[in-house]
Image (cartoon, rainbow, N blue to C red):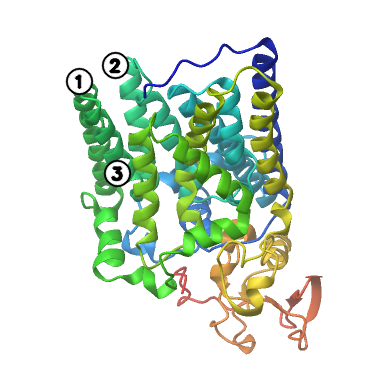
Amino acid sequence: MSASPPPSETPAERLLARAVLVLLLGVGATLRVWLALGDDGVAWPDEIYQSLEPAHRLVFGYGMQAWEFLEGARNWTLPGLVAALFKLSSLLGLEEPRGYLGLTKAAFGLVGAATAWGSWKLARAYGASPLAASAGASLFALAAVPLYFAPRAMSENASALPVVLGLAIALAPGASRRAGVVGASLLGLAVLLRLQNGIFCVGLLAVLAARRDWRAARDALAVLAGWAFLFGLLDKLTWGRWFHSALVYLEFNVVKDGAAGWGTAPFSYYGRVLFRAMGGVTLVMAGLALFAARRAPGLLGVAAAFYLLHALQPHKELRFLVPVLPVFAALAGVGLDTVLRHLPPSPVRLALPLAVVAVAGVSGLRVGGLTFRDIGQYSGAKSLQNAWDDFGPANRLLITAGKLPDVCGLKVEAAHLAWTGGYSYFHRDVPLYTHLGPGRESRLYSHVLTGSGGVGNGDVVASEGPFVLVRLPHGRCTPDPAWSSRLP
């Protein structure tokens, strides 16, 4: 981490650094909350059925169950945190979906903005000037991909903050023993949220060993062992077996290669999609990160290892890279500082960081126009559709259905239930049927959510986009003892 001494900062640079950091964090937080409250769509079923829906079941007593939470392929850390937000919403009087979902999405958005601050802190830990660190942090705070995923209740978003903040605290030069414990603990929490973040834990130990800081390495190893114990204990208490979720997850994804069933992609996928979604940010981030190689070789190696290990996996989704993006943003800040140290105080030295921020800002301006092709999802005509609010109209009709006094059962005919918000949006303790459920003549449900051409002899209660909510002509529902909350 040694580097040539930086030229002294001018008062203008110090003032500009503070202004840029405050501005990018404020704008980043505002954008994230605004996007959170304006989108009811589903980017991928995991954001509902691995977080919101199990949390809804914990707090309200009912909810659809994905296979992961029937067979125990996920631990309960993330749903537990979301459940705490749901409970807080209830205590604040926000007991309807708009209330608890809005608060939860906004909280995830604010975590995303705090993650950008973590990037700044990590760059500063490696000696970047406040202005260079702020410019690097803008590549996460304002860029399109982090903005798109930020409001979604996914493990990648939740774990990005403890990852970057843990590295910043644990790897800061001269970090105290307490700081090392706190930093390693944050990384341990990140693993509970997402198992793949174990790469960063191994990386932390490797960097400390490379520095020959054996005391810090031993402390970190002991702390991480403690968090591993907590991981196993949580599984023991919830699933009945030590490390049950990790074992089931690894068996499904590694031994059986089950994730490949959701699609595979070549090694070049992540680079291609990142360039398509935010080309300027990707080029600037990658280029500046290379300039950080001499000052932060270990951190660059950890980030590169995370990227390469994911690129080597057959099944790929862009969101899998969210935890490493703030680390690359911090490396970009260090790389930018390396460039600035070769320049005397001048307008150019002020202009370069502002140019980086401008690249990030331009990327953020196009976030609302991202298509599914831009984020590497789907093929054919669907890939050209806007990636926001997908199935949002259906979810808003689910909210409407939940408020109807006469609803005693609902069938979602127009879409696979996995691509809707489930009980998290419906919020009514009555049977919810998938498109594969019994026919309308069964009298097991009173309403259907269907396409505009599927009204039949029912009455339209509400409609939005291609979906309509229909009340069937019969009055009451027949009890269904065979109904299951398992998500097909």
Decide if residue 74 is on the left or right side of residue 386: left
Return the x and y of residue 183 as percentages of the image width and height: 36, 27
Looking at the image, which is closer to me, 459 or 76? 76
Q: Residue at x 29, y 16 (%)?
A: 177
**Mark 1: secondary structure:** helix
Seen in the picture, residue 337 relative to 455 is either above or below; the reply is above
Viewer-proximal residue, 116 or 126? 126
Mark 2–mark 3 distance (CA, rounded to whole Å):
27 Å
Q: Nearer the viewer, residue 58 or 311?
A: 311
Mark 2 vs mark 3: which is more N-terminal? Answer: 2
The 10 Å Cα crowd at callout 1, few under 14, some 14 to 19, many 20 or more, is few
Residue 343 is marked as none
Q: Which residue is mark 2?
A: 177
> Marks 3 and 2: in contact by CB < 8 Å?
no
Image quadrant for the N terminus? top left
Q: Marks 2 and 3: which is nearer the front?
A: 2
Label of residue 215 in the image: 1
Residue 484 screen position, x and y as percent:
45, 72
Residue 30, quarter of picture: top right
Mark 2 vs mark 1, CA separation in Å: 9 Å
- 349 to 467, vertically: above or below: above
The residue type indicated by label 1 comes to Arg
User: Mark 3 sits on what residue?
Assistant: 234
Mark sitting earlier along the chain (1/3): 1
The part of the image, by quadrant, that contains residue 428 is bottom right
Q: Are marks 2 and 1 in contact (CB under 8 Å)?
A: yes
Indicate the amino acid at tag 2. Answer: Arg
